[in-house]
Amino acid sequence: MPWSRRHGAGTAAVPAQRGPARSVRFESPVPMSIKTLARLSAPLLACALPGIALAHVSVTPPQAAPDATVKLSFGIGHGCDGAATQSVSVRVPEGVLAAKPMPKPGWTIEIVTGAYARPYQLYGKEVSSGPVEIRWTGGTLDDAWYDEFTLRARPTGFADGAAVPFVVTQTCEGGTSLAWDEIAKPGEDAHALDRPAPVLLIGAPAPVATAGVQAGHAPLAGSAKAGALAIEGGFVRAMLPGAKVGGGYLTIRNAGPEADRLVSVSTPAAGGAAVHEMAMEGEVMRMRALETGLAVPAGESVALAPGGLHLMFTDVAAPFAEGATVPVTLTFEKAGAVDLELPVLSPRASAPDGAAQASGAAASGHAGH
Ligand SMILES: [Cu+2]
């Protein structure tokens, strides 16, 4: 069994640590079948955000309140080029204190400690060192399986809205490794990254959006009607400061007997707007513009939703801010131009009622735009 291999050839692949490091190893006391565990969590591997490759390493929940202890699960969706994962290392970012791994049957835990860049107050005590890296080694996670590696930690001293990347390195059978260490610079398009580090957003939980639940005569935010078409449940996700690219989602219902086609999207809030689809490029899911528009068959609904079809806004002048609205014009071949206001929900919103946002839903879990 490959379990007996503690590290494979992974040590060299682990990023450098801060300060002098010390390593403590714990053997997991429970010799449970890892096959069973992997099977239980196997369905959770979809990627929710437009343009981010499927099965990138994710962090759940994707958002945490400032200065609060949070349980974080890192989802590993595939091996290294088909080879089974035998170790997973999570680098604990500066300012994330008191990291404690959750034991994992079949895996050995290693906690690497080191000096912090500055002292922090933790429960009334000053701390200047602590865990800087957590490693799970000695297990086997097949390329075809999904599993999560969990730790508890306390992000400390981050500003509301901060994005905290966790560098994750997988080491696989045969000694190959995969480092999820790319971090989008301000203004850089996170879509372009091949190996993005999973990012934890720091922020108080978003208030539940009212769009979709308000009653009355005024049209719901994010909805509109034009002829046989009804646009429903529209929203855009809030963007990180400096981000240039945003995503929008809505459902188009065609109650009429004739097919229609969404041929263009425009908004004064962005330099460019288009309908994108997700498509496999080799092993990687990428997005691309629908060159001939989006067909809306008679009597059917077409959903633009996180992880699939979406409105893509590029060259956004001022990042979409939660609580605001974005005016959008959809132009259809037959129904003509339809104006609507899309409410800006949390960067993690996956539905207009906010029900699934930041709740650890399996559908979310990647870095925002
Ligand atoms: Cu896109």
Image (cartoon, rainbow, N blue to C red):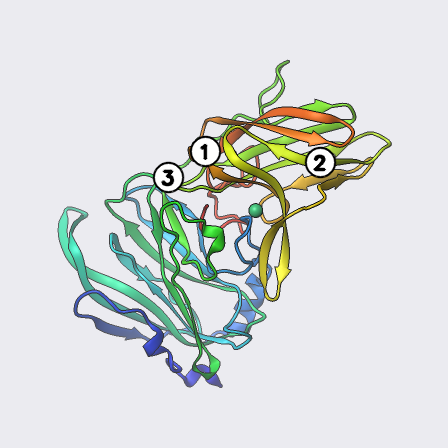
Mark 3 belongs to which amino acid?
A: Pro
Towards the viewer: 78 or 1: 78
Report helix, strand or loop for mark 1. loop
Q: Which of the two discs, 3 and 2, sits closer to the camera?
A: 2
What residue is shown with label 2?
262
Report helix, strand or loop for mark 2. strand
Whether residue 91 is situated above or below residue 72 in the rendered picture? below
Lateral position of residue 368 relative to residue 313, left or right? left
Q: Which residue appears at 50% of the width and 34% of the height?
A: 270
The answer as to whether callout 2 falls within 8 Å of ligand 1 is no
Q: Residue 320: which numbered mark, if any?
A: 1
Answer with mark 3 or mark 2, whichever residue precedes in sequence: 3
What residue is shown with label 3?
241
**Residue 90: quadrant of the picture:** bottom left
Lateral position of residue 27 relative to residue 267, left or right? left
Res 366 visible = no
